Every structure is written in C-alpha cells, then in structure tokens.
Image (cartoon, helix red, strand yellow):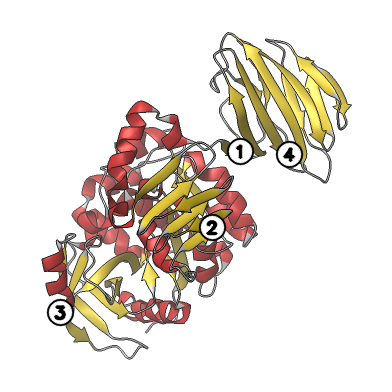
C-alpha cells in the first residue's frame, strides 16, 4: 500500500427525511436533528470521521437552505471544517454532489484518498467502521472503487443489496471482495434469499482515489465531467442545475469494472423510519421508547415522542406517536415505512407543515411563530450573541418590538439606539431597520407584525453579513 496519499472525507448532508415527519422537515431535515443521542446525526457522523481524518480535510455537501445550520453544527466540533461546506443551489442526487466535492479536493491535492459517507446514519461499532475504512483504502490504492457493505441481520426490504464474489489478496483487518452485482430493494422473499446467500446491504459508503474517480467520471459520465470542468463562479448555479439527477450507484458504481466491497458488522442503521428509531433506543418495562413529557397507561411496544407539551396515551400497542408544536403523527409502527405517502397528502393540503417548524432557524438565531392571522403575526425572536439580522424593509407591514431579555441594538431609518428588558419600539412600514445583539447573552424579543400582508417574502434586504440575497 502506498504511503503517498492524503486522506479526505466527504459528508453528504442533503435530503429531506420525509419518512421521519413531522419532526424532519424540508428546512430542518433529520441529519440536523438529535434523534440518536444528544448530538445531531451530522455531528455524530463528523465525530466518527475525525478519528481518521483531520478537520481541514473534511468536506460537507449540503443544500443552500441548510448551509448556515450545517456550519453552526460543525463549528461546535471542528472549526477547520466550516470553510469546506459546499452548498448546492438545487438538489441533484449523490453523483453530482460527490463529483463537485471530489473536483474541489482533486484541484488542491492530486494525491487525495477520499471516503464518502452519509450524514444521517447511526453506527454503534465505531472501531469496526474505522477498520473497514482503512481496509477499503488498501484496494482503493490499487485503483478500485470500494464500498462498505453491511452484513445483514434480517431480510430488510428498505436497502439495496450487493452480491460479493471472490476475495482479493489484501492483508487488512477485514476481507476485500470483488462486487459481482448490485441489486435493487427486494421483496421479503428475495431479501431472505439474499441474506441466506451472503449478500450485503449497500450502505452508500465509498472509498476511492480522487484521480481514479475523475477518470471514471470521464469514462462513464463524459457530459457531467465536461460540465464540471467548465464550471466557474459566474455559471455555477446554472451549470449545477443542468447536471443529471443520478445517484453514485447508477452513474458510476454499477458501470465501473474495478469495484470491490469490504463486508463489515458495525451495528449500522440508516435511521430511515420511525421504526428504526424505535429499535435504536432503550425500552421501558412496557417495551416503549419515550422522549419528552410522556404519560402512558396500558400502552406497550410503542414509540412515544413529544417535542412540546404533554403526550398522554391509553390502551395502545405497537404505535408511533410523534407530537410537535404544530403537527402530530399517529400510525401503526409496522407502517412507518409508508409515511412518505401520508406526507405527500399533507403537502397538498398544508405544504408549510412539510417545510418548516413553528421554530425556524436562521444564521443569526431563530424565530417562533406564536400566532398568526390574515393581517397580523406574533413571533418570538432570539438573536445569538454577536449576531445581527440584515438591514431590511417591509412594504406591507409595520412591526412592534418588545425586549424580553438581553439588550437590543436597533437601527431605525439611520437612527441607532438600544433597548433593555421590558422596553419597546415601533418600526413603521417602509422604514429601513436592523436588529442586533452586541451583548454576550442571547437577546429575545416579541415581535408583533400588522399589515395587509405578513408573509416571510415581504423582505427587501439592503445589507446582510451572511451573504443572503439583497
């Protein structure tokens, strides 16, 4: 094995996680939530990867809508990784996302050895994961595209499968096998057959050399390779939107000749359903998993998750109940894989409930909508220390601000002043204004909007430190 390569990792942090609705939503998907402990799934993934790669060599690909939240979560663990966050202007599946990140790495380091990992998976046996990663690098150094294949413990129908063949001659911690075939998600009977015949779950984790990847891309996806080569700052958004919506599996792995897999048992889950979340957590005496303020009586084998308020159940078995501030899900636990169908219906009747939570996170802090009508909206706004909102104006609404805690620095039509707790101010319609927290503690205000239109798109920005459109 060569000692000349430098190790990098790419985290894929896209997707909306609709099967975990109503907790996971478009603007705050499952990878940004703490579903498997105190850290978010993105932070858990980052923590694992930092055992094998330096923070400056960790790249994260996410959507433009999630960029600031991703940067904030990474900053808590590895500040050097923040500058390597790549924000897609639109979703284009895994191959374009990986291609963009690999191209960035390859330009700065032609000797890069790269691992690609999802941001929303759970792995209990981290040592086994790291051994598999290191073993995969042995074959990748010989120009193989290498996957990590999960040894199945049940005939799961929610995963694709990999059929392995003969073993390659590498002296790693684990065997390296050639890939004979990729198989789509099967039915239960086929899945059981695959388990009996030694097939592996396809985890979507890859290891390869950057130069090998770029050569494969040029061979099997020449149009994408040409588009990537011609992409620059001026044409970036247009070029990225023109990429084919194709996965890494379809676009490269299933076409390439030198493809290998490392079988590994690392207690892995893609956390793709509420049933999988249930299986990850400790159970009480009635075999229930509870989160938040829950009171259950004569209830068993259930997942009871309360984000707000009290959740009380009586006489239930084998159910999932997820309670958020503005939506509640109740379903049979065995049907949790079908929630996508339900979410599609919710999206037709009330699309906002699939996109945002009652609390919306922004780069400067967050806001929660407390009440809303046709001509008014009441918010609780929290501004983090040292942060400020954009200089902005509204054409259709005026705003009343009351400071609940902290000290607010306010600009109102070029006049700057401060407000302390229990003081208030009025921002007239069409006035340029800005809210800032120069203190060391969070600033909280209550905002009452009044006007003929109180939608979030009634914002004209004149200056924004976060680079949002003005």
Mark drawn on residue 291: 2
Disc sitting over residue 160 in the figure: none
Q: Are marks 3 and 1 in contact (CB under 8 Å)?
A: no
Name the residue located 40 percent from the left edge and 50 percent from the top edge: 20
Q: Find out whether the residues at labels 1 and 2 contact each other: C-beta distance under 8 Å.
A: no
Closer to viewer: mark 2 or mark 3: 2
How far from the left and from the top, in percent, is residue 143? 28, 73
Label 3: few (<14), some (14–19) or many (≥20) C-alpha neighbours in 10 Å? few
Q: Residue furthest bottom?
A: 171
For residue 182, which quarter of the picture? bottom left
Relative to 87, is 343 on the left or the right?
A: left
Q: Which residue is mark 1?
A: 362
Q: CA distance from mark 1 to mark 2?
A: 26 Å
Sequence-first disc among 2 and 3 = 3
Tell me if mark 1 has few (under 14), some (14-19) or many (20+) residues whose alpha carbon lies within 10 angstroms of its own: some
Mark 1 or 2 closer to N-term?
Answer: 2
Q: Nearer the viewer, mark 2 or mark 4?
A: 2
Q: Nearer the viewer, mark 4 or mark 3?
A: 3
Q: For residue 181, which quarter of the picture?
A: bottom left
Q: Secondary structure at mark 3?
A: helix
Label 3: which residue? 196
N-terminal label among 2 and 4: 2
Q: Are marks 4 and 3 in contact (CB under 8 Å)?
A: no
In the picture, measured across the screen, residue 30 lies left or right of residue 191, that is right
Query: Disc 1 or 4, which lies upstream in sequence?
Result: 1
Q: Nearer the N terminus, badge 3 or badge 1?
A: 3
Q: Residue at x 52, y 38 (%)?
A: 357
> Which of the pair 181/280 is nearer the observer?
280
The residue to which callout 4 is attached is 387
Q: Whole-percent x and y of residue 302?
A: 41, 60
């Amino acid at each position: 094995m060569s000692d000349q390569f430098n190790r990098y990792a790419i985290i894929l942090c896209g997707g909306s996680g609709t099967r975990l609705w109503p907790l996971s939503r478009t603007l705050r998907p499952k990878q940004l939530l703490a579903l498997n402990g105190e850290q978010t799934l993105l932070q858990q993934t980052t923590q694992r990867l930092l055992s094998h790669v330096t923070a400056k060599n960790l790249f994260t690909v996410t959507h433009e809508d999630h960029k600031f939240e991703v940067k904030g979560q990474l900053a808590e663990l590895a500040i050097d990784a923040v500058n390597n966050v790549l924000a897609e202007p639109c979703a284009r599946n895994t191959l374009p996302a990986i291609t963009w990140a690999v191209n960035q790495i390859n330009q700065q380091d032609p000797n890069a050895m790269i691992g690609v990992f999802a941001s929303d998976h759970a792995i209990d046996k981290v040592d086994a994961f790291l051994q598999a990663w290191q073993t995969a690098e042995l074959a990748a150094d010989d120009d193989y595209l290498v996957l990590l294949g999960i040894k199945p413990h049940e005939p799961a129908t929610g995963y694709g499968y990999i059929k392995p063949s003969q073993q390659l001659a590498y002296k790693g911690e684990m065997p390296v096998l050639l890939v004979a075939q990729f198989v789509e998600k099967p039915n239960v009977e086929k899945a059981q057959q695959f388990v009996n015949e030694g097939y592996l779950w396809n985890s979507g984790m890859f290891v390869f050399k950057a130069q090998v990847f770029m050569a494969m891309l040029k061979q099997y996806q020449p149009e994408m390779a040409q588009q990537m080569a011609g992409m620059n700052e001026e044409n970036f958004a247009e070029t990225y939107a023109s990429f084919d919506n194709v996965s890494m599996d379809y676009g490269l792995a299933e076409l390439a000749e030198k493809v290998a897999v490392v079988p590994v048992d690392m207690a892995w889950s893609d956390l793709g359903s509420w049933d999988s979340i249930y299986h990850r957590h400790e159970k009480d005496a009635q075999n229930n998993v509870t989160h938040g303020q829950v009171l259950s009586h004569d209830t068993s084998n259930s997942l009871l998750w309360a984000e707000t308020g009290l959740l009380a159940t009586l006489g239930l078995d084998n159910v999932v109940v997820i309670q958020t501030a503005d939506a509640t899900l109740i379903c049979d636990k065995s049907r949790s894989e079908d929630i996508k169908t339900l979410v599609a219906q919710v999206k037709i009747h009330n699309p906002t409930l699939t996109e945002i939570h009652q609390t919306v996170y922004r780069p400067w802090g967050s806001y929660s909508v407390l009440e809303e009508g046709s001509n008014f909206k009441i918010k609780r706004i929290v501004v983090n220390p040292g942060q400020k909102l954009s200089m902005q104006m509204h054409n259709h609404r005026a705003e009343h601000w009351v400071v609940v805690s902290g000290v607010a620095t306010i600009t109102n039509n070029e006049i700057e002043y401060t407000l302390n707790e229990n003081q208030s101010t009025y921002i007239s319609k069409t006035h340029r204004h800005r809210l800032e927290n120069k203190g060391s503690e969070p600033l909280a205000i209550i905002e009452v909007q009044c006007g003929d239109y109180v939608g979030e798109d009634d914002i004209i920005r004149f200056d924004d430190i976060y680079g949002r459109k003005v």
